[in-house]
Amino acid sequence: MQRDLPEAAEDNLAHRRPGRRRRTKYLLSALVVAALLAGGAVAVGSVTGRPDTGRPGGTGKGALPPATDTVRREDLSSSTQVDGTLGYTRERKVNGGAAGTLTWLPDTGSTVRRDGALYEVDGHKVRLMYGSKPMYRPLKEGDEGEDVRQLKENLRDLGYGDGLAVDDEFTPGTTGAVKRWQKAHGLEQTGRTGPDQISFQPGAVRIDRKDAAVGDPAAPGRPVLTTTGSAREVLIKLDVSQADLARPGTEVTVNLPGGATAKGKVASVDRTVTEEGSDPQNKTPKITVRIAFADPGRVSAFDRSPVTVDVVGEVREDVLTVPVSALLALPGGGFGVQVVEGGRAREVRVKLGMFGQGRVEITGGGLKPGMKVGVPKA
């Protein structure tokens, strides 16, 4: 029964994560420790219960292990590698602002910046301006509000209202600036504008997909396009139990197609938990984590390319470590290692700290950097 427990745990993990590389070094370490706990009496008995042969592979007290590794002083980090998908930031819907027939749409994958055309209805282009509040009403002289402020900021930045004060009032100066903008685009110079001419978006957008086709009817509120921001990002899914490894600001390394790598940080962690898995009776709760690149301009892989992400968790600096496989479960509980010195091996009790990269932090036992400890034969 004792030896079956870790095997069952490992089978369960394999069942829940078929074919995936998400089995982290930390979890592997935990499974090894669980196996040692389950089989500790057998393992220790094999070391201490028979006469010492004094040869490698012997079974008595002081017997040499089949192989050794070195005690190191180093920085240790808990980390995990997970699969992700390369994409773009801030997916948004662009809804129509005018009734009529769609007569033009931009190409998928193209980028539209301020004053660029987002779509066209009855031959009249609706242009992009920057702002967080949507263009939800016609704007004219005398109106007030945040949307008026956004309009004035854009007109000034585009060079049509150099003398405009950026405030919430649609003034006669705003009317003049709108007319100059309309004239530049071949529109009737009314000095009034609205959703049939302008769409406010948070910034430059990339056309992700078209939600309508040229020739389709357009109407206010009807989806036209799905856009994203122009900056690249990676989406990963983490088990809820691993949430602490990916707090905002956590540094990561993204392994891109072709072997290139890129540095990044956790930008955000969704607050909603989703359940995933093909077996409806055995779904795994996941959280979505968004990774922002330190230098997004250098990331040129195709959209929705598969990537892997190395997420670095807690870092312990300047600690003593041994391979996880060097651990021995001791009679009565606890762990130790076999120290190999002068052609003999002796057991010492140690306290365990953090696991990471196949090693474990240890204290106690008089261990020092450079000492040899027993490990299974490679």
Image (cartoon, grey):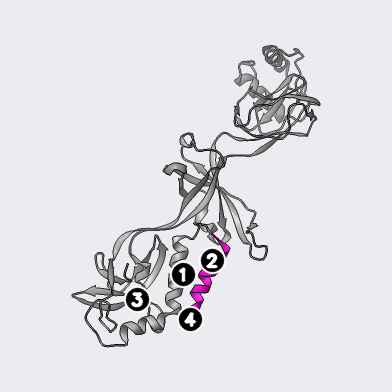
Question: Which portion, as a residue range, is magenta?
Answer: 1-18
Residue at mark 3: 336
Disc 1 or disc 3, which is closer to the eye?
1
Q: Is residue 178 in view from this perspective?
A: yes
- At label 2, counting other C-alpha atoms closer than 10 Å, the crowd grade (few under 14, some 14-19, many 20 or more) is few
Disc 2 or disc 3, which is closer to the eye?
2
Quarter where residue 356 is shown: bottom left
Residue at mark 1: 31
The reply to whether the C-beta atoms of the residues labelled 4 and 1 are less than 8 Å apart is no
The reply to whether the C-beta atoms of the residues labelled 4 and 3 are less than 8 Å apart is no
Q: Earlier in the sequence, mark 4 or mark 3?
A: 4
Disc 4 or disc 3, which is closer to the eye?
4
Q: Earlier in the sequence, mark 2 or mark 1?
A: 2
Amino acid of disc 3? Gly
Residue 195 lies in the magenta stretch: no
Please state the horizontal and vertical placement of residue 21, each as a whole percent of the image: 49, 57
Q: Earlier in the sequence, mark 1 or mark 3?
A: 1
Residue 10 lies in the magenta stretch: yes
Residue at mark 2: 13
Amino acid of disc 2? Leu
Residue shown at 60% from the left, 57% from the top: 286
Spatial CA span between label 2 and label 3: 27 Å
Disc 2 or disc 1, which is closer to the eye?
2
